[in-house]
Image (tube, grey):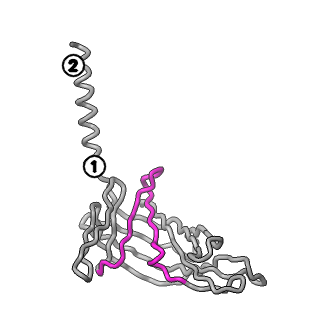
Amino acid sequence: MKYFKLFLITITLISAFSCSSDDETYDFTGTWKLTSVSSFNYSPDNKEIQVSNQINPSENCLQNEFLIISNDGKATFNSSSELEIYLQLVEGTTDQLEQQVNCIEKESNTIYSWTSGDYVRTNEDGSFSTINSSGFNTITLVDETESTFITVNVLPENESRIIFGSHPNETESHFIEFEGETIEINEIRYLTYERQ
């Protein structure tokens, strides 16, 4: 009987702690500073064309890029520069590619709403779409027109960092001449921010 009571107490404590951790959510509120941008260029038509690069803030670019997440449901991107990244042929070749990275000074402040649960939006035809962002370490940012959705995730190995990526449909395609053919090039970017 003594062991049975000890067993019941142990099960009760485990249940209590496991239930309470399920109800908790990660606190995203605060100021986050951009620490790196990973860019991946690829061709949807030619799987051999893939070029990636990691761009870190330098004294000339990406120095004042912040994401401020408030507890009132608003998230603001404050930016002083913008990256223009595209593929080009290495000079003097017809089959070697390199990324060209240009930093453009451009002040912007963009405000989003954010939610840690599922986000339901009304489509133009009256139907509904659900953006699933449930989870301990995920939130969704939504712009005022409900046309841009950004899923922000906490890095599992370092909870003081968050990461999110652009969808291929959100970036502009460009075209290059490669081995005598015109090839479409898309880009995906992953941005990493660190809590300040």
Q: Which residues are magenta?
A: 145-173
- The residue under label 1 is 24
Q: Secondary structure at mark 1?
A: loop
Q: Tell me, yes or no, whether the two marked residues, 1 and 2, touch with CB atoms within 8 Å.
A: no
> Could you say which quadrant of the image residue 104 lies in?
bottom right
| Percent position of residue 52, x then y | 61, 69
Q: Amino acid at mark 2?
A: Lys
Residue 65 circle label: none
Question: Label 1 amino acid?
Answer: Glu
* Marked residue nearer the N-terminal end (1 or 2): 2
Tell me the quarter of the picture where residue 127 sits: bottom left
Q: Residue at x 58, y 82 (%)?
A: 184
Q: CA–CA distance between discs 1 and 2? A: 29 Å
Q: Is residue 149 above or below residue 7?
A: below
**Residue 24 in the image: above or below residue 48:** above
Image x and y of residue 173, in percent: 53, 83
**At x 36% / y 59%, what residue is drawn?**
138
Give the camera-side residue of 160 and 165: 165
Query: Could you say which disc has been placed on residue 5 in the image?
Result: 2
Is residue 151 found left or right of 15 in the rendered image? Answer: right
When the figure is inspected, residue 95 is found, relative to residue 27, above or below; the finding is below
Question: Where is residue 178, by image quadrant?
Answer: bottom right
- Residue that appears at 59% across and 74% down: 42
- Residue beneath the point at 33% across and 69% down: 141
